[in-house]
Amino acid sequence: MKNLTSKLLAAAILFAAPLLSNAASIQLGGPDRYATLGDATQGFTGSGNPLTGNINTLFGGSWTKEGDVNNISGLSDGYLTITMDGAWGGQPVITGTWTIADSFFDLYGSAVVSIHVGNGNGEPDFFAWLVTGKSGTWSYDANEGRGGGLSNLGLWGSGTPSRVPDGGTTAILLGLSVIGFGLVARRQVA
């Protein structure tokens, strides 16, 4: 039975390995302020409000802004929903989570999440990250009050969707694999 458990564990690891991402938390910023976003693979900073041209240049391609969460829209705006333990305009440290709606990935293959803080009194004014998943954590630190207050979080989309509905094929194959392992285990016991 121990041998069967080892084989099932190995199969589960082999099945899950391609699904695991190499994304991590990436911290961006300078001496005045910095921000961190979880489940990111790449990030950049800039001055002023992040505009479509900035995102296009930094990440390449053609990007469309699909969400802008701020003190007017609240904690959700279309495809982007956040939580936070502080207030808009607040500082020095605010943390929270971000979530992208599944329907966003029916339209786009890639996502960028941006954070904009009050302009002036330091750099950078915005932070932007390429993300691989649908959710993660974020934080903003005005470095002991030397930076600007939190203004908004944005969501940008680009590319064609990579998700293709499989009509249940994955579940069927997984079920057949489990049955196969069961048959192998039964043979070994007999």
Image (spheres, grey):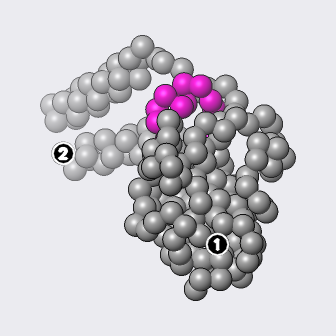
Q: Residue at x 77, y 60 (%)?
A: 48
Depth check: give the residue in front, 111 or 184: 111
Relative to 32, is 55 above or below? above
What mark, if any, has residue 159 been given in the picture?
none
Three-letter code, disc 1:
Gly
Three-letter code, disc 2:
Met
Q: Residue at x 51, y 37 (%)?
A: 79
x then y, percent, for residue 42: 69, 55
Depth check: give the residue in front, 7 or 159: 159
Residue hosting label 1 = 148
Distance of label 1 from label 2 (alpha carbons): 60 Å
Q: Label 2 neighbourhood size at 10 Å, few (<14), some (14-19), many (20+)?
A: few
Relative to 116, is 165 above or below? above
Lower position in the chain sequence, tag 1 or tag 2: 2
Depth check: give the residue in front, 67 or 23: 67
x then y, percent, for residue 50: 73, 52
Helix, strand or loop at mark 2: loop
Q: Is residue 13 visible to us here?
A: yes
For the C terminus, the image quarter is: top left
What mark, if any, has residue 1 been given in the picture?
2
Q: Which residues are magenta?
A: 98-111
Farthest residue to the bottom: give it. 144
x then y, percent, for residue 20: 50, 47
x then y, percent, for residue 94: 48, 70
Relative placement, left or right, of 130 versus 177 is right
